Amino acid sequence: DLLGWGYSQLNDVNTFSAQAKVDALAGFWKVVGNNQPVCIAGASLGGAAAIEYAAANTDIVKGCVFIDAQGFVDGVGPMAMLPKFIAEAGVQVLKSVPLRNSANKMSYFDTEKYATEDALKVGRFHCLRE
């Protein structure tokens, strides 16, 4: 899970910045990684965090898998500074069926094959946590 999405625990989390997401990956590896090399995967925006973590930890990360990864050339910029209520409103928009359906239709070349009901559900999944 990417910090702030899905089913990550959010107790005592003060920021959801790009660096906080990378730090959460580092903390996860320290707890469950047994000091062993890993292959890291990142889906959607998690791809950006995986890239940052992998680039900073070349001794640990031996491979990467990206699933529809998205990233930013210069970080997330002002989005990291949004007040919490605005960020939460953004999540509400992201989980709307019309928005996800529209995004699927714009994202796939072959919409008949890939912009399916399953793609819509997967796209909304990480936004549905209350």
Image (tube, rainbow, N blue to C red):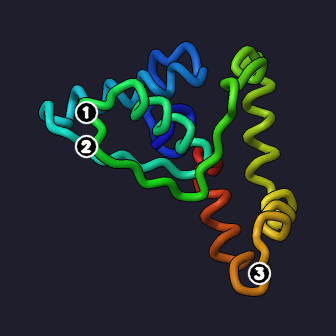
Quarter of the rendering occupied by the N terminus = top left
Q: Amino acid at mark 3?
A: Asp
User: Residue at point 14% right, 31% down?
Assistant: 35
Which tag, 3 or 1, sits closer to the chain's start?
1
What residue would you read off at disc 1? 60
Q: Amino acid at mark 1?
A: Ile
Tell whether label 1 touches label 2 (CB within 8 Å).
Answer: yes
Q: Is residue 34 left or right of residue 21?
A: left
Q: Residues within 10 Å of mark 3 (few under 14, many from 20)?
A: few
- As measured in the structure, the alpha-carbon distance from the residue carrying label 2 to the one carrying label 1 is 6 Å
Q: Quadrant of residue 8?
A: top left
Q: Amino acid at mark 2?
A: Val
Q: Quadrant of residue 111?
A: bottom right
> Where residue 93 sits in the image (x, y, percent)?
82, 45
- As measured in the structure, the alpha-carbon distance from the residue carrying label 3 to the one carrying label 1 is 37 Å
User: Residue at point 74% right, 28% down?
Assistant: 87
What residue would you read off at disc 3? 110
Residue 104, relative to residue 44: is it above or below? below
- What secondary structure is marked by label 3? loop
Q: Residues within 10 Å of mark 1 (few under 14, many from 20)?
A: some
Quarter of the rendering occupied by the C terminus = top right
Residue 54, relative to residue 119: is it above or below? above
Which tag, 2 or 1, sits closer to the chain's start?
2
Q: Residues within 10 Å of mark 2 (few under 14, many from 20)?
A: some
User: Residue at point 60% right, 57% down?
Assistant: 68
> Where residue 56 sits in the image (x, y, percent)?
40, 24
User: Residue at point 77% right, 86% down?
Assistant: 112
What residue would you read off at disc 2? 38
